Image (cartoon, grey):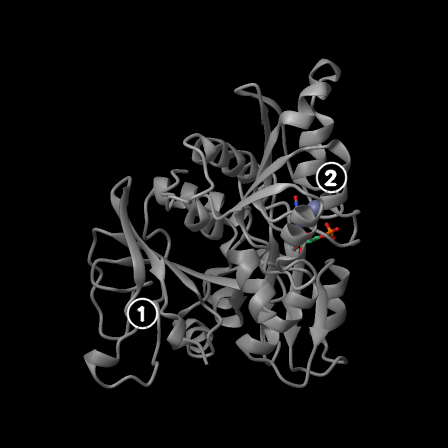
Amino acid sequence: MRCDSVPLADATATDALYMERCLQLAEQARGHTSPNPLVGCVIVAAQRIIGEGFHPKAGEPHAEVFALRSVATGDRPLLTDATLYVNLEPCNHYGRTPPCTEAIIAAGIPRVVVGMIDPDPRVAGSGIERLRAAGIAVTVGVCEAACQRLNEAFVHRVRNARPFGILKYAMTLDGKIASSAGHSTWISGEAARAMVHQLRAECDAIIVGGNTVRRDNPHLTSRHPHTPLRVVMSRHLDLPLDAYLWQTDAAPTLVVTTAPADHPLVPHLQACGVEVVCRPVLTPTTLMKELYNRGIMTVLWECGGSLAAAAIAEGMVQKIWAFIAPKIIGGTSAPVPVADLGLQKMSEALCLEEVTWQTVGQDILVSGYLPKSAAP
Ligand SMILES: Nc1c(N[C@@H]2O[C@H](COP(=O)(O)O)[C@@H](O)[C@H]2O)[nH]c(=O)[nH]c1=O
Ligand SMILES: [Zn+2]
């Protein structure tokens, strides 16, 4: 990850380099920390790194503690002349772990460089204040844009009390996600599918609708060790008895429905190890709230066009990953990735921001963010 750091009056020439190392370290835990952020920490003294660490998982010590623990006994006297780099403001509260500010102060470190302020209201600037009150020189905002980007899901979750939503789809060059007959395997090539498995491993949950289960019978697993929760949103529970989702226990599965708890499919699903939750109201918003309450930070919408349109309309999608395959299937009734959004004029189209393009094998991946104003 490259840092395009805005020059700061109190930053040194090498601060951005060490912050980049923090980002690299933090990245190693992607997909494992929810609902906690990705945090890396580097301790530098005598122009060399004497300690480093990252936060591996919620409930485990924070990055700063791992970095402090990693300093060799022979290097400990250097701590009183060291700079500690961390991409997120050190915490100042007793959560699952004690405050990192206390550990930094106790170590006698005279300077701390922070990438960004922690949006968690339990911290929100108080960590920086605490360090400064202890006489530590604190520089804030080195590589800030890259730090914000790294923790975009954490920031969104804390600020909005719901998970960060990514809508992923693969479509043909003529904008179809299946043929008119409903056939959809495979639109994108192997390289794109491998990338989707990587993306799934970085998310906490994948959401599909009942239609996708009926038509595509997907597995929704990942080739990587971390497999996210598979979530099926099905109002009427009109789901097949023998879907792959219930036949494999490769990943936990949750079905959320408005059907009554005594619906005949419920005991069958439960016997297959599927968790069934019955709710009076089920919309993309209520589902995301449910997932938020379970500590979920990043959600991948891998649904069909109707559910995708509802999720977008309700502001439950922040980012788009669209794979475009250079093939044409045609068909006026062939399904499209996003159904009706009620927009009439092209000037009303949702224009993605910070768009990137890349080739993935034969396919193109277009990725970007929905405008924040699109959310309710
Ligand atoms: N993981 C992390 C931080 N996470 C901060 O602590 C909160 C979680 O606290 P806890 O439940 O005790 O783990 C989280 O919401 C965020 O504000 N802070 C840091 O200085 N360094 C870290 O490595
Ligand atoms: Zn901490």
Up/down of 18 relative to 269, above or below: above
Q: Is residue 32 visible?
A: yes
Is the residue marked by circle 1 packed among few (<14), some (14-19), or many (20+) residues within 10 Å? many
Q: Is residue 163 visible?
A: no
Q: Residue furthest top?
A: 74
What residue does disc 1 label?
A: 336
* Residue 23 screen position, x and y as percent: 50, 38
**Residue type marked 2:** Ile
Which quadrant, please, contains the N terminus? Answer: top left
Q: Earlier in the sequence, mark 1 or mark 2?
A: 2
Which sits in the foreground, 9 or 48? 9
User: Of tags 1 and 2, which is closer to the observer?
Assistant: 2
Which sits in the foreground, 167 or 156? 156
* Residue 165 screen position, x and y as percent: 49, 63
Q: Residue at x 71, y 45 (%)?
A: 134
* For residue 285, side relative to residue 274 (left or right): left
Snapshot quadrant of residue 290:
bottom right
* Label drawn at residue 105: 2
* For residue 136, side relative to residue 217 (left or right): right
Which sits in the foreground, 270 or 132? 132
Count of labels shown? 2
Secondary structure, mark 2, is helix
Which sits in the foreground, 307 or 124? 124
Secondary structure, mark 1, is loop
Up/down of 140 relative to 309, above or below: above
Q: Residue at x 28, y 64 (%)?
A: 176
Q: Is mark 2 within 8 Å of ligand 2?
A: no
**Residue type marked 1:** Val
* Residue 249 screen position, x and y as percent: 68, 50
Q: Are marks 1 and 2 in contact (CB under 8 Å)?
A: no
* Residue 295 screen position, x and y as percent: 68, 60
Snapshot quadrant of residue 321:
bottom left
